[in-house]
Amino acid sequence: MKKSILFIAILSLTLVMVLVGNADSAGKQFGKITLPIGRVEVQSAGSEKWKKASLNKAVFVNDKIRTRAKSRAVIVLTGGGEMRIGQNSTLELLKAEVMAMQKEFLAYLESGDVWVSAEAGFGVKSNVSVGTPTAVAAIRGTKYRTKAGEDESEILVYDGKVDVNAAKNIIDERQEKRKSLAPGGASG
């Protein structure tokens, strides 16, 4: 009798630990790939391998998604909204914080383009930011497209407001250039 009670207690504790672990990882889910067209690949966090994306594949914070030529993918964000990744793009998923009245997502577009729609519901604060090598665009309940280039980025706003800021490396580079052009500077 004592052995069966001990066994049930251990089994219950194990089940609770598994459920808590799953709830914790679910909090870090960025969304699901609902429409992989062509060659769409996912590199899971901590892995070197790229694996073919399947329909309704869950993607998590720190995963990377890559599309090849003539390929596209749609990610439905946890809590609502979506990101459409264009061909020849690489997108790294950096942050997903979904709470009752607030949604915050952050991704880094290494190359290519992504279209974002994350309209907030009544009273819900929504912030979906996409960084590129040269800029950061932060959504304010709207739709926009971001294109990442080596020297410049392009933000196309379809509806609403988007905050655009230069990336830190660009700001630092401009400040150094201003210092050198100032009176008494190296070339001033």
Image: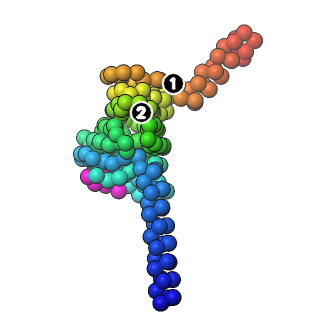
Residue at the spot 65% in from the left edge and 22% down from the top edge: 176
In the rendered image, which residue does mark 2 sit on? 124
Instruction: Report which quarter residue 87 is drawn in.
Output: top left
Q: How is the image coloured?
A: rainbow
Q: Nearer the viewer, mark 2 or mark 1?
A: 2
Say what secondary structure mark 1 lies in. Answer: strand
Q: Residue furthest top?
A: 183
Residue at 33% across / 22% down in the picture? 159
- Are dots 2 and 1 in contact, CB under 8 Å? no
Q: Identify the secondary structure beneath mark 2.
A: loop
Q: Please tell me how crowded label 1 is: few (under 14), some (14-19), or many (20+) other residues with Cα within 10 Å.
A: some
Quadrant of residue 129 within the rendered picture: top left
Amino acid on which disc 1 is placed: Asn
Q: Which residues are magenta?
A: 51-55
Using the numbered discs, state the Cα–Cα distance from disc 2 to disc 1 in whole angstroms. 23 Å
N-terminal label among 2 and 1: 2
Mark 2 closeness class: few <14, some 14–19, many ≥20 residues within 10 Å: some
Residue 50 to residue 121: above or below: below
Q: Main secondary structure of the magenta part?
A: loop
**Split into 4 quadrants, where in the image is the C terminus?**
top right
Residue 84's tag is none
Give the labeled residue for mark 1: 165
Q: Is residue 169 left or right of residue 54?
A: right
